[in-house]
Image: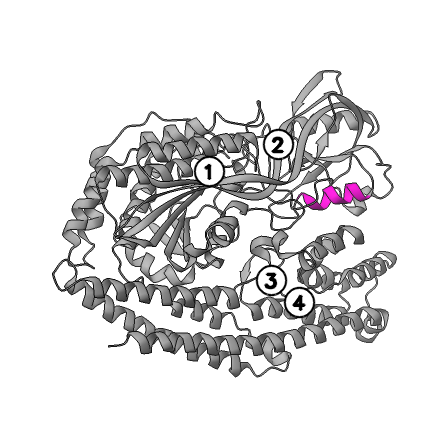
Amino acid sequence: MPHKKAESGYRQKSQNKKWNEGVMKMSMAEMKERKAAGSLDKQSQRYSENVNISYAYNLAKKMEEIKCNELLGYRTAGSEAEKQTGQMLYQEMIRIGLKEVAMDPFTLDTWEYEKANMQFRTAGGQLIKAVLGGYQVNFDTNGPKEFEILYAGRGTKQDLAGLSVEGKLLLVDINQADEWWINYPALQAKVKKAAAIVAVQKEGFSEASPDVLNANDICGPADARALSISKRDADLLKEALKKNNNCLKVTLDVKSVVEYDGTAYNVSGKIIGKDPDSYLLLSAHYDSYFAGFQDDNAAVGMLFGIAQGILKSGYQPERTIIFNALAAEEWGISDTRYDWSCGAYNQIFRIHPEWAKKSVVDMNFELPAYEHKSADEIRAVYELVPFLRKFVNQVPAPKSVYPDGVKVVAPIQTWADDYSFSIGGVPALRNDFIESSFSRSHYHTQLDNMDTYDEDAYRFHHILYGLLVFYFDQAGVIPYDFVVHLKAMKQSIDHKILRQAGIQKERLSDAVEAAKKAAEHVNAVIQNIRSDHEKKRGTALFGKQERILEKQMNEKLLAIFKFGQDRFNRLNWEDEQKFPHEVICDNLRNLYGAKQAIKHGEATKAVEDYLSEVDNNWYACHWEKEVYEYFTNYVIHREPEKLMWGAGRIMGHVNLFDTIESIMEKEQETEKITFGFLESEERYALELEAIDNAILSQEQLLKDTIHQEIRDLKQFETMLQEFERLFSK
C-alpha cells in the first residue's frame, strides 16, 4: 500500500528551529575526537542556523518545470530539457557563491522522449486514450498509426510460440524487480519481427497504484522497441482482446528518438579550502523519469542546500569542497548492459581523473526527502565503515522519522553514481534507499512527486550530511580501514568448494590474513598520527609540516584503496559486487549441485535450482538462443568505452544454453517417470558431460584466479607495509 506520508500529501513546511538546533547541539557535544571540537561545534551551529530547507525544496520544485514530455515529465540524457536544467544549475551555483563553476561536456547517446499515446476501444465500446511511458528506443510513428495488438503473456519464447506477431504490438506482463529486465522481451519480440512490446508491470515496480506507469533504462539496442502501460489500461486492453479472440486494432502516436555521440554536461562548483588540492566531493544527478522529485531533484536541492548553508555560515574549509550536479545517471549509452551512471563515470574517469588522487570521499545523494525505513542508512565502501559508525553514533536521528537511528552498511552497490566514483579511486557513500518499499511502489513512476515530501527526513539529511562534511573536512588523516575489506574477503572464501575443486584452501586464507595484519599495523600508524595531531591542532605546534604529512598519508591511502578496487572488485551477471574467487565459487556450487540432482533423477531441479543460477543462464529457460547470446556477447565482446564501469569486472561466462534446452526438452517428452541412479545418468549422459566440462573449466579458472588474487594480496600487503615504514614514528 502507499506510504502513509505519501498518502497524506505535501504538508506545509515549518522551520522547527528548536528541533533543528537541538540535533546540532546533541551531535556536536559528543564530538570529542578533536581538541578544537568546541570551535567546530560553534561552526556547525552557524551551519544549522543558515541551512535553508525551503530553498532546497523550491529548487527541486523549479527543476520539475523543465521537461521533455509535456504530459509525463522526463528529463532525459542529452536532451534539450537536461541541457536547460544544467544551464539553470550552473547559474544557480554562481548565484549562491560557489567558485570555479564549470559545465563540463562529455559524449554520450541522447534520448528525447516527446510522446507515446494509444487509443483503443474497450470490450464495451468505450474509447480509451492511454498515455504510455517510454524506454530509450527509436520509435517514431510520424503521427497516429494503426497497429494490431496481441496479448503475449510474459513475452517469452514459449509465450510467442504459435503466435503470428510480425508487424504487431505485443502486450506483455513483466516483473523487472524479481524476474528479468525489459530488454529481454523487447529483443525477443524484435527477433520475431514484432513492431514493439507494450509492457505492464504486474509486480516489482509501480505497485502503489494501477494507474501509474513505470520507466527504467533499456539495457539493450535502440531498435528493440518497448513502451509501458498502466495496469488499469492494460486490463481494459486484455478484456477487449479476450472478447475479440486476441486480435484488436489500436492507434499509436509515438515519438522517441535515440541519437549517438551527443553531448551532456556535468555541472560543478567549489568552496575553495585552505588546501586547494585536497577535495571533498558531493554529488547528485539531475536527469529524471517523470517528475523525479525524489529521484533526484530533491537530492540536487539538498546538494545546493548544503552548499548554501556552508557558504552562509562563513566556514572556510580545510579541503576544497566540490559540488557535482551530474547528468545522465538514469541512462546514457545505448546497447550495453551498463547503460546508467554515465555522467559520474565520465566525471571521474575522463573529465577529472586527477580528482581520484586528491578526493578523500564522494558523498552521493539519492531520494533524500523520504524516510524509506525505520532506520536511516548510509551505504559505503568497506574502508569507511568504522569511521562512519563512529560519526553516526554522535548524531541522534529524530525518533519520529527514524526510530531505529542511523546505520552504516557495506559494500556499495552498482545502482547509483557512487559505484563509478569508488572504482575510479574515490571512497564513496550514499544515503541508501534501494531495499525500501518506495522502490517497489513509487520509484520511477508519476507518484515520485512532491506529494512524497517528508520535511523532517529532508531536514535531518541536510543536517546529517552537512555535519559529515565537517567531520571529513576536519579529520586530517582519513582512517580508511582496510581490515574491514579483508575480513569480508576472508568470510567470502568457501572452503568446501575449494576442496572440491582440488585447491589448497589455506593459501588464499593465509594471504588474506597476512594482508589483514599489515592493515592492522596501518590502522595503528594512522591512529598514532591522528592522536598526535589532535593534541597539536589549534596550537603553534600544528603547522605546514603536519599538513604536508597528512596530505601525503591520504594520497598513499587512496592509492592503496584504488589498487583494492582494481584487483578485488568484480561483478556477477546480476551486477552485484563480489570478490573474484567468489563469483567462480558461486558457479561451481551450482554446477556441482546440478550434477548431483541429475544423478538422483531430479533433472528439472538441476535446471531450476542450479544451472539457472550459473552466470546469466536463467535466461536460457525463457528466451531464444539469439536473444541469450546477444545479451551475453554484448558484455564479453564489447569495447570498454561501451561498458564503462562494468568493463573488465565480469569473470568470464559459462554457456549452458544447449544443456538447459536439452534437459527441458527431455523433461517435456517424458511423463512423470522416476528414474533410478543409473537410468538418469544414462538418459542425461550428454548433459552431464557438458556440465563436467563446465566444471573443469571453472575449476581451472578458479585456480588461476586464486593464484592471481594471492599475488595481488601480496602486493597489497607490500603497499600497506610501505605505508607503515614511511609513516611510523
Q: Earlier in the sequence, mark 4 or mark 1?
A: 1
Residue 234 at what x, y percent from top left? 69, 29
Q: Earlier in the sequence, mark 1 or mark 3?
A: 1
Q: Are marks 2 and 1 in contact (CB under 8 Å)?
A: no
Q: Nearer the viewer, residue 298 or 125?
A: 298
**Residue hosting label 3:** 648
Q: Are marks 2 and 4 in contact (CB under 8 Å)?
A: no
Q: Are marks 3 and 4 in contact (CB under 8 Å)?
A: no
Evaluate whether residue 383 shows in this view: yes
Residue 545 at what x, y percent from top left? 22, 66
Q: Nearer the viewer, mark 4 or mark 1?
A: 1
Q: Residues within 10 Å of mark 4 (few under 14, many from 20)?
A: many
**Residue hosting label 1:** 296
Q: Nearer the viewer, residue 576 or 333?
A: 333
Q: Tell me if residue 202 is in the magenta stretch.
A: no
Measure how far apart labels 3 and 2 are at the Cα level. 31 Å
Measure how far apart labels 3 and 4 are at the Cα level. 23 Å
Label disc, if present, on residue 112 of the rendered structure: 2
Q: Residues within 10 Å of mark 2 (few under 14, many from 20)?
A: many
Measure how far apart labels 2 and 1 are at the Cα level. 19 Å
Q: Is residue 477 above or below residue 440?
A: below
Label disc, if present, on residue 95 of the rendered structure: none
For the stretch drawn in magenta, the main secondary structure is helix
Evaluate whether residue 416 shows in this view: no
Q: Nearer the viewer, mark 2 or mark 1?
A: 2
* Residue at point 63%, 44% (across, down): 176
Query: Left or right of 159: which side holds 182?
Result: left
Residue type, mark 4 in image: Asn
* Element under disc 1: helix
Q: Earlier in the sequence, mark 3 or mark 4?
A: 4
Residue 326 at what x, y percent from top left? 47, 42
Label disc, if present, on residue 590 of the rendered structure: 4
